[in-house]
Structures are given as structure tokens and as C-alpha cells.
Amino acid sequence: EAQVTQNPRYLITVTGKKLTVTCSQNMNHEYMSWYRQDPGLGLRQIYYSMNVEVTDKGDVPEGYKVSRKEKRNFPLILESPSPNQTSLYFCASSLLFQGASGTEAFFGQGTRLTVV
Amino acid sequence: QKEVEQDPGPLSVPEGAIVSLNCTYSNSAFQYFMWYRQYSRKGPELLMYTYSSGNKEDGRFTAQVDKSSKYISLFIRDSQPSDSATYLCAMSASGTASKLTFGTGTRLQVTL
């Protein structure tokens, strides 16, 4: 089954304690991305990657790091989480080129992070 | 002003009604337009994908794009309770997957 798997689904942590949210896809997609979803703000892109060892900032990258050492994995790292990073996080993957006929972007189930 | 504006709702309709969901945008470079459906506690899933202006139909769903007005719509015919979800519009300027801009989503409730 084609899927994007995120872990953990729920996480409560304290300010300043480093954490990693994992993301893995089994579709051999080049493109992977992290979003955060907040009420009234919608989905905002944090970081994206077009292939192994190629990453770039999205709209809200401050306070986050990513790495892409393998094609299937794209972990999101919060070195020193703060309460304003409390949010619902989604990982997504797709083929890189989408053309006029389109291609499907697959999202993970989400990670609900609370930083206290 | 946000690049993509979407009424958050909630929108409540009776079963069988025709639903109209809309987004407006300000960036004239957008050429690729998508609608995602997001059920509660789930990730978004792609529903419709349209390139440039025009209509696209898939079963009970029709997507319309009017680039001259910077306005896109999703119509749902014969709405069902299973259509109850949040609908997100998304758009991009390029044919690559690098930059998607999302609307905030409209919550739809279809009642029996």
C-alpha cells in the first residue's frame, strides 16, 4: 500500500528538549515536504526536499531542521522547541514533475505536537 | 492580504444539496490548482487537479478555474454525509512540486 508514515502521531514535550519527527514514504518519490497546520493559517510549508541531499526552506523554516540522507526518509528536527511550535505537522511526498495531467501528493496522518 | 483566501465556514447543507466551495487568489502566476479533502484527524488527500482555466469533472465533483477573475470553485453534486470534511484549495505557479500555497480550508457538514 502506498503511504507516508509519520511518527509519533502525538507528542507532548517541554521547551528546549530536542525532538525528531520521522517521515517515511514507500513510493520512491523524489519530492518530500513538511507542513504545519494552524487554525486560521492553513497549511504552511516548513522545508522541502527535491531529492537526496537537496533541501530548501519553505515559508516558515525558523526553529526547524531537516535532512534527506535517503530517498524514503525526511525527518523533521526541532533542536530547541518552543511553545509557538505547538501545531499539527504533516509530511507529504510526490513525484517531482507534475505537468498538466497532475500527480497525486500523499500526506501522512499528521503529528500533533504540544510544547509546554 | 493572504495570497489565497478561502471562507473557513462552517458550511452546513442537507444531504443531496449542491455544494459550492470557492477560493480567490492574488498571484497571477498560479497555473496549477488543486482541491484537497481532509477528514478529521487525517492528512489531506488530493481530490481534484486542474491546469490553467476551465472545468474538470470527476463523478460528483467539478472543479472550475477562472484565471481572469482569480477565482476557483469546487462543486459537489448530490452531497453525502461522507462528504463532511474540510476542503482545502491549493495552487502553484510551476509544474514542479516545490511550492504549493494552500487556502485555510472550508469545513463542510452534510446533514441527514
Image: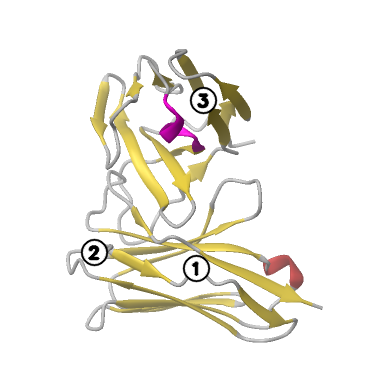
Q: Earlier in the sequence, mark 2 or mark 1?
A: 1
**Quarter of the N terminus of chain B within the rendering:** bottom left
Q: Nearer the viewer, residue B70 or A15?
A: A15
**Quarter of the C terminus of chain B within the rendering:** bottom right
Q: Position of residue A34 (x, y in %)?
A: 40, 35
Q: Is residue A78 left or right of residue A6?
A: left
Quarter of image, res B60 = bottom right
Q: Nearer the viewer, residue B42 or A112?
A: A112
Does residue A4 appear in this view? no
Q: Position of residue A114 (x, y in %)?
A: 55, 30
* Residue designated by label 3: A24
Are labels 2 and 1 assigned to the same chain?
A: yes
**Residues packed near mark 2 inside 10 Å, few (<14), some (14 to 19) or many (20 plus):** some
**Residues packed near mark 1 inside 10 Å, few (<14), some (14 to 19) or many (20 plus):** some
Disc tally is: 3
Q: Amino acid at mark 3?
A: Ser
User: Alpha-carbon distance for marks 2 and 3?
Assistant: 29 Å
**Residues packed near mark 3 inside 10 Å, few (<14), some (14 to 19) or many (20 plus):** many
User: Alpha-carbon distance for marks 3 and 1?
Assistant: 31 Å
Quarter of image, res A93 = top left
Q: Is residue B35 left or right of residue B76?
A: left
Q: Which residues are magenta?
A: A82-87
Q: Is residue A60 left or right of residue B14?
A: left
The chain letter under disc 1 is: B
* Residue designated by label 1: B8
Q: Amino acid at mark 1?
A: Pro
Q: Please tell me the numbered disc located at residue B30.
A: 2
Q: Amino acid at mark 2?
A: Phe
Q: Nearer the viewer, residue A43 or A15?
A: A15
